[in-house]
């Protein structure tokens, strides 16, 4: 059970995949870290030596914002946009998509579950 930046990564997976379980590290950053430290990417996490674990931890701490620090930075950026009244900040505040997507249809991830309003069904034509 290896711990990097306070996250327990899976021990049965290859280290290049295990590192992506840390918030802020994806496949590219994982490959960069392993290249910088000289660790073989296909090594299983459980097979790493203590020296390799400490090398990887030092590389992450020195070069990357991860986990809580990264989340604080992102939420601070969103709060700044809201405080200055920027369009993107207003969209975040209204819980709507902030990057130009349409909202007449779709956008369900951001807007939540559809709420059906009574009286919107088409009326059947009356017989005369």
Image (spheres, rainbow, N blue to C red):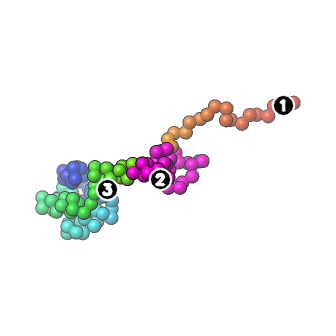
Residue 26: image x %, image y %? 33, 59
- As helix, strand or loop, the secondary structure at mark 1 comes to loop
Q: Which of the two discs, 3 and 2, sits closer to the camera?
A: 2
Name the residue nearer the viewer: 53 or 59: 59
* Residue 86 in picture, x, y percent from top left: 47, 53
Residue 24, numbered label: 3
Q: What element carries label 2?
A: loop
Report the quarter where the C terminus lies.
Answer: top right
Q: Which mark is residue 89?
A: none
How much space separates mark 2 and mark 1, taking CA atoms? Answer: 54 Å
* Residue at (51% x, 39% y) in the render: 113
Q: Name the residue under label 1.
A: 127
Q: Position of residue 112 (x, y in %)?
A: 50, 41
Instruction: Judge depth for marks 3 and 1 and give the one in front.
Output: 3
Q: In which quarter of the image is residue 32?
A: bottom left
Q: Mark 2 and mark 3 in contact (Cβ < 8 Å)? A: no
- Which residues fall within the magenta stretch? 80-109
Point out residue 3 in the picture as x, y percentages from the top left corner. Answer: 19, 52
Q: In this view, does 2 lie to the left or right of 118?
A: left
User: Could you classify mark 3 by the number of other residues whose Cα lies within 10 Å: few (under 14), some (14-19), or many (20 or more)?
Assistant: some
The answer to which of marks 2 and 1 sits earlier in the sequence is 2
């Amino acid at each position: 059970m290896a711990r990097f930046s306070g996250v327990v990564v899976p021990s049965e997976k290859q280290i290049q995949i295990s590192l992506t379980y840390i918030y802020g590290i994806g496949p590219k950053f994982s490959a960069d870290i392993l290249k910088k430290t000289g660790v073989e990417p296909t090594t299983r996490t459980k097979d790493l030596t203590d020296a390799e674990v400490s090398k990887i931890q030092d590389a992450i701490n020195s070069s990357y914002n991860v986990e809580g620090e990264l989340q604080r930075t992102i939420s601070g950026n969103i709060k700044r946009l809201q405080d200055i009244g920027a369009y993107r900040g207003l969209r975040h505040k209204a819980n709507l998509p902030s990057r130009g997507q349409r909202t007449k249809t779709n956008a369900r991830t951001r807007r939540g579950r559809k709420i059906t309003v009574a009286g919107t069904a088409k009326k059947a034509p009356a017989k005369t």
